[in-house]
Image (spheres, rainbow, N blue to C red):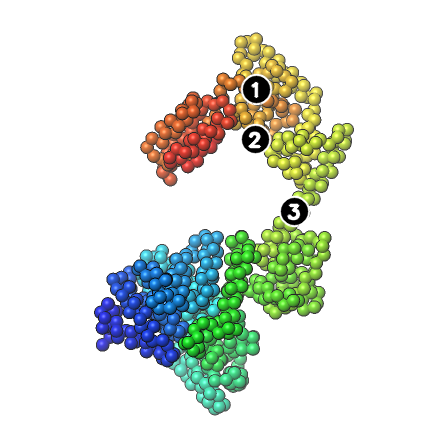
Amino acid sequence: MSTPSGDLLDREVAGREWEGLRDLALRSNPRLNQELIERAYWRAWEVHRDQKRLSGEPYFSHVLAVARTCAEMNLGSDAIAAALLHDSIEDSPVTAEALAKEFNPTVSLLVDGVSKISGLRFESREKAQAENFRKLLLHMSRDVRILLVKLADRLHNVSTLEPMRPEKQTRIARETMDIYAPLANRLGMGRIKWQLEDHAFKYLNPEAYGRVASMVGMQREAREEFIVSMRDRLQDAMNKNGIDCAVQGRAKHLHSIHRKMRSQNLREGEVFDLLAFRIITATVEDCYHALGVIHSLFTPIPNKFKDYIATPKRNGYQSLHTALVGAEGRTIEVQIRTQKMHEIAEYGVASHWRYKEEENPSPVPGGEAERELDFLRTFIQDLEEGEWSEDPSEFMEELKVSLFQEGIFAFTPRGDLHILPVGATPVDFAYSIHTGVGDRCIGARVDSKMVPLRRPLTSGEVVEIVTRNDARPSRDWLSFVKTSKAQSRIRKSIREQESEQSESLGHELLEREFKRNRQSMPDEATLKVAAEAFGMDSVDRLVQGVGRGSVSALQVFHRVHPPEDKKSGIIESAQKLTQLATSLGGRRQKGVRVEGHGNMLIHFAGCCRPVPGDRIVGVITRGRGVSIHRQDCVNIVGDRIAEERRMRVDWDAGEDEKFLVSIQIHGDDRKNLLADITGQISKSDVGIQGGSFRREEKDLSALVQVTIEIRDLKQLEKIIRDVRRVSGVRQVERV
Ligand code: MN
């Protein structure tokens, strides 16, 4: 009788399920620690007893499925036990310490690691993503089985997404496609990788998935027939030649069909051709023998042959690949490999546990799995030691290259390995060694021959960078470098060079201008004042500006030595105006002293409303005397105001003089906000001249503007601080 999973809560049904799991595990490894797994089984059964999944199934069915996948991968007793317990820390009062006591420290380490990885989200902004990725790597570097159990967990979750909300389906599918499937691939686990991809594909691109699936379904019969006849022909040929092997035929997986259709622009009918055969032999010699036999039977397609036995892929994958024109003129792909290579292709890192004694469950030192871990450890060490860029896009790029094999590798003459993106040049290589090497690079020898700096490197090359101490990066390099690291360093260096150049040019132009006018170069302080008048915060910036041409040397000269004749004329008419105004009974505004001209009609500019303490400047206006602005007021910076119209002015305000200023407050639209703000302001004994209140419907906020009378900048700053403390206030600014 079949066992509906709903009955899993029944101890008897659960007992039969246990036997199923045990038999599956023992089939791949008779030496398993049955007792340990059985205890974990019943513990998990207890822990999840009252929990249901969204689908209504008992939660225990999930951990059981994950354990079965781990048993199939033959990850060993500890990992199978950990798979059963992988959700127990999160969902119950069970702790890692308790698991260590009840089972063993390895089980505890694995369960703890899987729980921690499960809390990481990868859909967020790139920065957070990079940080989470670092954590993920850190956890899995403690024991790679943590990731293997996690992959089994993810496989079951992504295959049971149906009852979830659409956003959650998409998030999990995206994360699976972007993070977990490439990781499975990096660890050489082909079988898990394509299963993850096919499930994720269904939710990420339902339309394409439906198309490919129905296409494959419709052609199933015709295809099966073709596969069977082709497989028989291949098997016959192998038998005749005395090659001991098994021939398998299969359709490609849905997502890889989709990928291939897109990359090769195939139409539906042509997908029929996407059939693959696999020949699994006993020995390596037989692989090459088998290749010879099929090449003599069918026409091989040029350039399709690849020998991954002689040069394995970086994840350890080995196989011979070829493509043939098969019966009926159809293209078929054939992979030839030994049984051992096949297991590595399907299970990757996990296959290293397949042959191991249960008594020694840690990776064999120097073995493939250990090297894989070494790779991860070095990788993380680099992260810890800050070898990696802070720039998240740079980080993700290097991560993709290192982890997802989208790259080439080249060596220094000393044998240090550098992994770079495809198309990277000697300049990228130089920057990957060290910024200083990149900056001083003048040439490169690749495999002892000089090559142009723009020539792309290929894997395995030995690259020697030639440097010269006074060399500088060239702008041309930007047109061919491939890494963001090289790009940003080159740009930075060019900027520095340009600033230096414009600075020395600016100096020269200024000196010439002052000399031409028989004046000596002004001192630093004078130039600083001039710089501020042009809206620049330092003398260096001003000098560079002159070098670049954004400010002319003559403008700077006039700023320092205003043309007096013109100016005195203007001042004279302003003074006349003042006299006229006074004789008509006008009141002179006080608070400011104009350089050398005590009696001047002045007024404070409405645009920037200066208060004592602000740095100010006077501008002689037509018919209204001297208008007082803040030095940084947008209406007067740069060359908006002719030099001769500017006057030096100083504050000369008495204690009792008040100045109007407006502040703008942005806050939550709540009851009494305005009252609380005005109350807070009144505490400082400051008069409120007016105000306005506006609701922003879109984000439920309020915008309050208040005009107040104050003594000086210090008092204004205190009021701004006070208002910021009012509850609900988000931002306070002087207008
Ligand atoms: Mn889980």
Nearer to us: label 1 or label 3 = 1
Q: Earlier in the sequence, mark 1 or mark 3?
A: 3
| Mark 3 Cβ and ligand 1 under 8 Å apart | no
Disc 1 marks which amino acid?
Asp
Where is 8 relative to 231, above or below?
above
Report helix, strand or loop for mark 1. strand
Mark seen at residue 652: 1
For residue 167, side relative to residue 279 (left or right): left
Q: Is residue 403 left or right of residue 569?
A: left
* 298 and 361: which is toward the camera: 361
Locate residue 144, reporting x and y percent.
45, 67
Q: Residue 43 at x, y = what percent?
A: 29, 67
Q: Which of the pair 41/249 is nearer the observer?
A: 41
Q: Earlier in the sequence, mark 2 or mark 1?
A: 2
Residue 530 is marked as none
Q: Nearer the viewer, residue 325 or 573?
A: 573
Q: Which residue is mark 2?
A: 632
Identify whether 735 is placed above or below 247. above
Q: Residues within 10 Å of mark 1 (few under 14, many from 20)?
A: few
Along the polypeptide, which appears first: circle 2 or circle 3?
Answer: 3
The Cα atoms of the two marked residues, 2 and 1, are separated by 20 Å
Q: Is residue 34 visible?
A: yes
Q: Position of residue 561 (x, y in %)?
A: 70, 26
Front-most of residues 40 and 315: 40
